[in-house]
């Protein structure tokens, strides 16, 4: 059997002693694609780590301008190969070419690569801090080993392990990357890896700066995140897989940053329902159904108060769920996972009001599904009723009053986002003031009167949140330069001679525009 090649230690080569192979499957047709990809064994993993460690050491002496240039070259190459990338990603994921892949996700990918290049070049992300009275200076710098990146299946471009946000942030912070392709889109990742390696050579970076394999047995994935020579890891995927990786990394004392599970509660206050019920129903369905519900910011939980307007809202929303054709899920495992999650919600007391079944149709589809439960039942059984269904599935929780809505917020688990819709004329302001403080600490990003599906790649964005949304509440996977800090260490220099200091900590500002904290004042001046 002929396998596609892996990229290890600056060479495109056959996998050494592969322990199996697999094909990608087109979810729109349920047909396997022709190419076969290797499942790498221990020899590949050991060589990846050793080459990554060498590259980490070599990158310490590489001028930041070459790292920035690599990211920009890579973005240019991606744009030059747009058609090929869109075609293969469409085959492997079933996601539409237009506008999702070509006009949405691909420009976002190149934009974040360029923003990473800019952040690396400007140097302010290093948070250089100088206390002249005691001659102690510190800054952020790269880790002492490669970053292993595990990409998800739902964003073949923007979160790809060889092109997405984690990749861009790790490289911009001065670290090499070991990318494990998601098995849902290995061919897409292969194209990215080829382009990235071309850019590595043109930018004259160490050959091990970018490496890529497709799949490993589970025990080797655990080894990859816990190996003594690994700097850190980034994972986006299921909670069950993420927690296994986290346990292995934690035991070894290795940082790992996880994005795992989020139902993204949307609280709709009474004045908003009365004011614009039909508009809200259309917004909620559009957000739930976007990408067939396979967004980590999909609103899987909608909390409302009892009223005639609320019943009208629920009826309108259920109608939208019923009459619209469900989108294509990314694979058979996703189809089974959605069905299992709906069963858990029903067994915990939720009542089905739309959908709830697999659809026998071309492609992997699960009927758009809406459930409802009263707030008292939700409060009594919050864990099961927050089971994430990664599809067009949402649970409506009906509360008696604002007190009970706030009690629901108090048992909500950690989420990426939380939203409050309220009356535009301020009729709900008192209720908002009661609810917001309870919700604020449960979510990474708080929204008002806006659906959560949509993550702007801007410096102020937080795409993170408390557990189980992520493994650490203090970091974001989107937003530069903040996302780079996951892949950095704090370097401190105490009474080090001026000529021996990194340029970022010397008296003269190395760029003239870099921001540094000098004796308690943020400034661009020299010391």
Image (cartoon, rainbow, N blue to C red):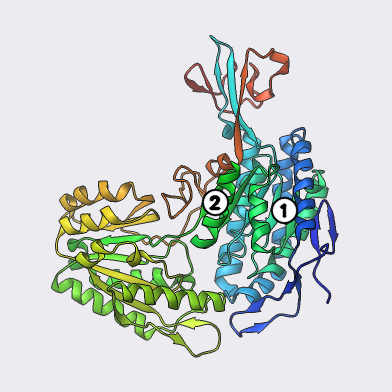
Residue 191 in view in this figure: yes
Front residue of 336 and 492: 336
Residue at far top of view: 133
| Disc 2 secondary structure class | helix
**Left or right of 190 in this view: 288:** left
Disc on res. 74? 1
Asked where in the image residue 387 lies, by quadrant, the reply is bottom left
Residue at far bottom of view: 360
x and y percent of residue 308 in the render?
A: 14, 74
In the rendered picture of this protein, how many numbered marks are placed on residues? 2
Residue 237 in view in this figure: no
Disc on res. 456? none
| Disc 1 secondary structure class | helix
- Marked residue nearer the N-terminal end (2 or 1): 1
- Report crowding for label 2: few under 14, some 14 to 19, many 20 or more residues within 10 A (C-alpha): many
User: Measuring 53% from the left and 41% from the top, which residue is drawn there?
Assistant: 482
Front residue of 215 and 86: 215
User: Measuring 53% from the left and 9% from the top, which residue is drawn there?
Assistant: 133
Residue at mark 2: 246
x and y percent of residue 358 in the render?
A: 45, 85
- Report crowding for label 1: few under 14, some 14 to 19, many 20 or more residues within 10 A (C-alpha): many
| Closer mark to the observer between disc 2 and disc 1 | 2
User: Measuring 77% from the left and 32% from the top, which residue is drawn there?
Assistant: 61
How far apart are the two marked residues, 2 and 1, measured between alpha carbons? 30 Å
x and y percent of residue 134 in the render?
A: 55, 10
The C terminus lies in which quarter of the figure?
top right
User: Measuring 79% from the left and 41% from the top, which residue is drawn there?
Assistant: 54
């Amino acid at each position: 059997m002929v396998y596609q090649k892996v990229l290890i230690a600056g060479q495109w080569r056959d996998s050494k002693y592969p322990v199996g192979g697999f094909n990608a499957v087109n979810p729109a047709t349920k047909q396997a694609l022709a190419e076969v990809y290797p499942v790498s064994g221990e020899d590949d993993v050991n060589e990846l780590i050793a080459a990554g460690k060498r590259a980490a050491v070599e990158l310490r002496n590489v001028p930041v301008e070459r790292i920035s240039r690599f990211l920009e070259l890579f973005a240019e190459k991606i744009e030059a190969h747009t058609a090929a990338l869109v075609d293969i990603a469409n085959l492997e994921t079933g996601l539409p070419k237009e506008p999702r892949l070509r006009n949405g996700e691909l420009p976002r990918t190149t934009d974040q690569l360029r923003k990473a290049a800019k952040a690396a070049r400007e140097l302010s992300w290093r948070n250089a801090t100088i206390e002249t009275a005691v001659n102690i200076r510190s800054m952020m710098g790269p880790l002492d080993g490669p970053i292993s990146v595990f990409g998800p299946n739902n964003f073949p471009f923007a979160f790809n392990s060889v092109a997405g946000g984690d990749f861009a942030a790790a490289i911009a912070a001065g670290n090499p990357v070991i990318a494990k392709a998601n098995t849902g889109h290995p061919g897409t990742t292969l194209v990215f890896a080829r382009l990235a390696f071309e850019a590595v050579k043109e930018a004259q970076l160490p050959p091990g700066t970018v490496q890529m394999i497709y799949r490993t047995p589970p025990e080797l994935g655990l080894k990859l995140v816990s190996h003594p020579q690994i700097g850190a890891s980034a994972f986006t995927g299921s909670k069950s897989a993420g927690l296994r990786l986290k346990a292995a990394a934690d035991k070894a004392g290795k940082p790992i940053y996880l994005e795992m599970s989020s139902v993204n509660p949307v609280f709709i206050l009474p004045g908003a329902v009365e004011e614009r019920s039909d508009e809200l129903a259309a917004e909620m369905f559009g957000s739930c159904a976007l990408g067939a519900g396979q967004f980590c910011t999909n609103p899987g939980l909608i909390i409302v108060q009892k009223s005639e307007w609320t019943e009208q809202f629920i009826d309108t929303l259920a109608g939208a769920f019923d009459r619209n054709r469900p989108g294509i899920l990314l694979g058979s495992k996703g189809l089974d996972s959605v069905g299992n999650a709906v069963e858990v919600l029903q067994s915990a007391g939720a009542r089905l009001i739309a959908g709830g079944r697999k659809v026998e149709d071309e492609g992997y589809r699960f009927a758009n599904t809406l459930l409802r439960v009263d707030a008292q039942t939700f409060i009594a059984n919050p864990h099961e009723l927050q089971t994430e269904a990664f599809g067009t599935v949402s649970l409506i929780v009906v509360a008696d009053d604002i007190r009970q809505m706030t009690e629901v917020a108090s048992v909500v688990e950690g989420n990426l986002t939380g939203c409050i819709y309220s009356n535009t004329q301020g009729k709900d302001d008192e209720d908002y003031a009661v609810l917001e403080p309870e919700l604020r600490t449960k979510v990474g990003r708080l929204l008002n009167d806006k659906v959560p599906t949509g993550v702007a790649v801007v410096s102020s964005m937080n795409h993170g949140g408390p557990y189980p949304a992520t493994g650490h509440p203090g970091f974001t996977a989107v937003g530069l330069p903040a996302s780079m800090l996951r892949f950095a260490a704090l370097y401190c220099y105490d009474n080090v001679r001026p000529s021996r200091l990194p340029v970022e900590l010397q008296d003269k500002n190395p760029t003239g525009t870099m921001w540094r904290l000098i004796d308690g004042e943020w400034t661009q001046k020299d010391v």
